[in-house]
Structure formats: C-alpha cells, structure tokens
Amino acid sequence: MSDANFRQAREFFLSGLAHYQAGRFVEAERDFAASLSLVPGRPSTLTNLGATRLKLGRFEEAVAMLDQAIAAEPDNVEALGHRATGLAEMGLLREALADFDRVVAITPDAAAAWTLRGSVLNDLGRQAEAADSYRESLRLGGDAELNRYYLAAAARGEAPRTAPRFYVESLFDNYALGFDEQLVASLRYRAPQILVAGLQREKRIFASAIDLGCGTGLCGPLLKPLCARLEGVDLSRGMLAKAEALGVYDALAHADLLDALRASAQPCDLAVAADVFIYVGALDAVFEALARRMPAGGMFCFSLEESEGGEALQLRQSRRYAHSENYVRELAARTGFEVRALERAPVREEQRVPIPGLYFWLARKD
C-alpha cells in the first residue's frame, strides 16, 4: 500500500466521521466506502461503515459489514454493539443478546451496553433480567432518566410522569424511513381516519388547526380539507422532513408539543393528537396549555391506549403510556372541556393482537 493511498484513505475516513457526527449519513457512507476501497479490510472503517448503514436503516448490509470487522477483531466492542443493534432491528433478539453479553463481559463497566442489553431482554419478555440490567447501568452511572424510565416499564414500578425527550426523539428519528409502511400496513393503524371521521360529523371548517406530534404527516392530508390553516409539531426532524414533502402543512415546527403550545398565544380552534399521548404520559399540562389557546367551541380530539384495571396513568412494558376513560373525563372537566364523543376501537395491532384504544372528541366550553 502506498503512503499516498493511506493518506487519502485517512482523509476520507475523517470526512466520514465528520458527516456521521453531523447526521449526514448518506455523505458519511460515501466517504467511509471510499476509504475502505483504498485500504480494504480495516476494522475501524468497517465498523463505522456498518454503523452508518444502521442509521440508514439497511440492517442486513450493516450486519454483514460488522461481521467482517469482528472477524478481524473478535473483541471489538464497538462493532459488537453495533451488530447487536442491527440484529435486534432484524428481530434476531437472541443473537443480539449474545453480542451484548460479550460486550459487557469484555467491558463490564460500559453503562450504555447494560442499558441496551436490558432493552433486548425486555423485548424477549425477560423483564426481571431486563430490570437487573437497567439497575446495573444505573449503578455504573448510566443515564438516570432513561434507565429509570425503562426500569419502571420492565418492573411495573411507579411510572414517571413523562417519557424522556431524548428517548422519544431518537426513537422516531430511527423509525422515520419506514414508519408509514410499518405502522399502516403491518400494524393496521387507523387512528387518523377514525379521528377525522369524527370531526367530519361537525360539518365545519376550522380556522386554525394544530397536528400535535404530526410525525410523517399521516393526519395532514385528511385534516387539510377541514381547516383554513394547518400547523404540525413534532420532536423528530426525520419525521418532519417526510411531513414537509407532503406539501399540506402551512407551518411545521421541530419542538416538544407542550413547548409549542406554550410558546404561542395565537388562537387554535382544532387540535389533533393521533397516537401521540402514549409517549407523553401525564396530560394535565397539555390540557391546560391548550385550554388557554382554544376559543369556545374549539375541538380537541386524540387517541389513547386504554389502561388495564381503570388505572389513570400506566406505563406498560412496551414503554408506552396507557390512560383510563375516567382520567380523561376528570381532566376535561377541570380544564373547561366537555366530552362530545368517545369510541372504543383498536389503536393498532401487536403480533396480530389488537391493542384496545380510546378515541375522544372534546369541545371547549363557552
């Protein structure tokens, strides 16, 4: 190998790292691949190229690249961790767990690896072991907010009032590429259609509507004919990029939905939240912020997972929140809303099992 080739490969590698750290994964892949073509088989380049392809949602290609890195360096914990993530995304949970077990055996003080190992155990239905893994991460100084949230879901402990922002944002950034196909085709998701059908019974045009947690914009094309102005808000930049491409939103904001509601005093006579509050948790602050902006007669509609046993707020092992009918009715009465309609219907399916849901249509009182 010539010195010139090595220098050029190093330049491509460093450029790839800069693109990766900035979230420019297409450019990162290009530069890592160029570096690899000049210096084939280099484990660090294989590892970073595999990690980049994970970010691009190409899990099989990523795992194949990481296999090569691990073949060259069997104790490469970075490559093992990335491969475990790819295997988990492909549904190969036992294989992913084996990789995470190797990582924590090699580096037992790696708090983040204990967290990821716990998540795989949770998905395997081994909640007691998952909880132990989260506790170990906490002992080692792992992210306290994230691990306590995961621990509460796995061990059915006292639920935090809301999900960590970082968790929700990264979850949906990672889902953005195949989100619509997975949710609609595989999970039989119909919340937007159900909520908008209820609004159509009002036979009115809303002056200003806000789609809370708009995601990729599944509600947007259905809502647009019912309102003069439509705004979308979401935590995920990846989701917002897909929503923007639809061309139906008059404005889109990258923000937490509660922050967005509080940031403006502009009247809003329609608010929709389809399959969003399952990642929010306690809803009192949302209701209060919306009540300040919504004129009399305004509509607020949303879907929820229905809690078991009538528990007001419940964090499930899926890490999604569920709510009770009474919780919503009491909150609505306290903040000046009346329940115009309520329907019970599945919100989606999991492993072909319907998840019981609540669909509410509230009206702002005079």
Image (cartoon, rainbow, N blue to C red):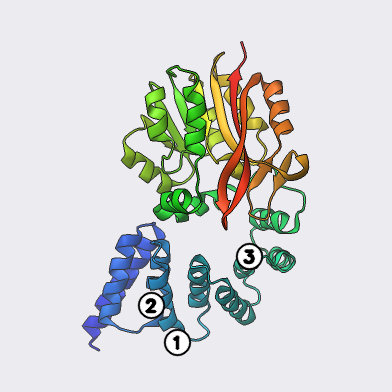
Q: Amino acid at mark 3?
A: Thr
Left of 49 or right of it: where is 119? Answer: right
CB atoms at circles 3 and 2 under 8 Å apart?
Answer: no
| Mark 2 lies on residue | 46
User: Could you tell me which residue is drawn at 72 percent across and 54 percent down?
Assistant: 152
> In the rendered image of this protein, does residue 86 appear above or below residue 217?
below
Which amino acid type corresponds to the residue marked 1 in the rendered image? Answer: Ala
**Which percent across, then down, holds residue 296?**
57, 13
Categorize mark 2 by other alpha carbons within 10 Å: few (<14), some (14-19), many (20+).
many
Tell me residue 89's x, y (percent).
50, 65
> In the figure, 198 relative to 69: above or below?
above
* Numbered badge on residue 115: 3
Of the 4 image quadrants, the one containing the C terminus is top right
Disc assigned to residue 71? 1
Q: Is residue 295 above or below residue 327?
A: above
For the residue labelled by badge 3, is the local secondary structure a helix, a strand or a loop? helix
Specify the quadrant of the image occupied by residue 51: bottom left
The quadrant in which the N terminus is found is bottom left
Question: x, y (%) of residue 259?
Answer: 54, 34
164 left or right of 233?
right
The disc label shown at residue 92, or none: none
**Callout 1 environment at 10 Å: few (<14), some (14 to 19), or many (20+)?**
few
Q: Earlier in the sequence, mark 3 or mark 1?
A: 1
Precedes in sequence: disc 3 or disc 2: 2
